[in-house]
Amino acid sequence: MEVADIPIGLSYNDVLLVPKKSSIESRKSVSTATQITKGISLNIPIITANMDTVTESNMAIAIAREGGLGIIHRFMTVEREAEEVKRVKRAQSYIIDNPYSISPNATVGDAREIMSKNDVSGLLVVDQKRRLLGILSDRDIRFVKDDKMLLSRAMTPRKRLVVGKPGISPDQALEVLDKHRLEKLPIVDSKDIVRGLITSKDIYKNVISEKSAKDRRGRLLVGAAIGVKGDYIDRANALADAGVDLLVLDIAHGHSDSVIEAIKKIKKETGVPVVAGNVATKQGVDDLARAGADGIKVGIGPGAACITRTVTGAGMPQLTAVLSCAEAADGYGIKVIADGGIKNSGDITKALAAGAAAVMIGSMFAGTDESPGYFVTRNGTKYKAYRGMASFGANISRKKVDKTIIDPQEAFDIVPEGVESSLPYKGSVKEVVYQLVGGVKSGMSYSGASTIEQLKRNANFIRLTANASKESYEKLSQY
Ligand code: XMP
């Protein structure tokens, strides 16, 4: 190969978006809605990374409420990952299909345990055929001292309950709830068998909140990651049964025979849309798209906790990767997700302008209230762990999923491609998203774009010299 044949690769920091005439008067008239697969639309182009220090159900719930999507990581048992998905799907819906229930012969202590374990404020009391006998809310037992008291004595009995029929619309349900000043409306059929539960909280959150990312039944959208080895088909099936909206094939080097094979198998088995990756080239997109991927995740080594490029010498500057992969994906009518290396809202705008339908973010959401893990305080600042999924610690934890004792040889065998760090407290996901989306909307207006599609069409990048880069990014530090 000649030196002259070596192409140049660009990172987000190597370019800026050229400002254009804009007729946009306020951020309110800019829409960040985006479609990531044929059936999945989001209101903000932000997806939280499938990493064990970023996305479990709390994060997925928080980001979907803001209009984005969380991908539950896969470094847990199949049962637990499916349970995490179910938690998100249950978190809001205008109707809960299988509300938690209890027998009238159970005790106040039993009810307290079930409510606390499942984080719910009430239980339906049913007989063995699931006929409704009453409702028990946490208020009914708040001051009950005797844990052994039978629920039949503590519940509000059936004759005092207002109920709805299956098929009731959100508007009708809201009317009944308002009229009777109720929190919960059990849905029962003609035989009084429980068919669901509607809560006023869910109706307000789901039907009324325009911004959350939800499925047709008002439930929050959620994705989940799977691998391509071992029990991955069982995992995919369990996640599909749990109601997952999107499966993400999460492989560091996704341009491989095993990923191509896995896409075909998963699509055949589950029917759930599959985003596959990670790749960074047109050829990578071609192969995964031909195998049936519904979306492609792009990024080899740009992530904050990634050392793949240093350890292996392989990688692709992220802006170039997104530009070439998005163009290739367009030919198959599918979208790309730009994964890793987002350091600020400007990077998101650049990724979208380069053709990504959304970005996947890890580090910027680590250290929030909703990221997994605990805060530790050092010198008066709170921190939470953030680690690459190919880091030493993450590798060891993975082995502990099935084993309790690690063989020293196994530890020796690990060649990490990620680092373990901790990041300062950032507040809630809502606060982080507000700043990011505000910046993106403003960025779109600089390109005269009121939609992401328009941004892609309008955008012109300019490359920066070393001096232009200094002028752009070297600023006074905030006091
Ligand atoms: P950010 O920059 O948002 O990146 O923190 C998140 C993305 O980083 C990738 N990732 C890794 N890449 N080694 C890598 O080379 C790792 O250990 C590692 N862990 C995560 C992943 O694509 C994630 O979404």
Image: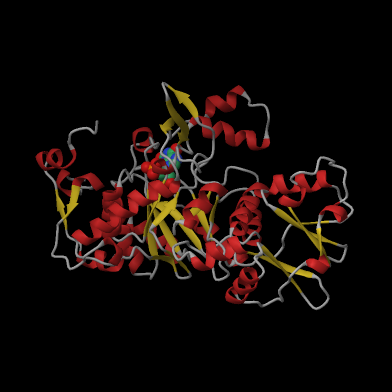
Task: Give residue 124's position: percent from left, percent from top.
Answer: 77, 60
User: What is the quadrant of residue 304 in the picture?
Assistant: top left
User: What is the quadrant of residue 122 in the picture?
Assistant: bottom right
Task: Give residue 115's position: percent from left, percent from top.
Answer: 72, 48
Res 405 visible:
yes
Task: Give residue 170's position: percent from left, percent from top.
Answer: 59, 73
Is the residue 69 above or below the residue 294 in the image? above
Give the residue at x 32% y 64%: 328
Is the residue 365 above or below the residue 262 in the image? above
Split into quadrants, the picture shows ligand 1 in the one at top left
Res 11 visible:
no
Task: Give residue 125's position: percent from left, percent from top.
Answer: 81, 59
319 sits to left or right of 89: left
State the residue in front, 460 or 130: 130
Give the residue at x 33% y 68%: 330
Is the residue 83 above or below the residue 244 in the image? above
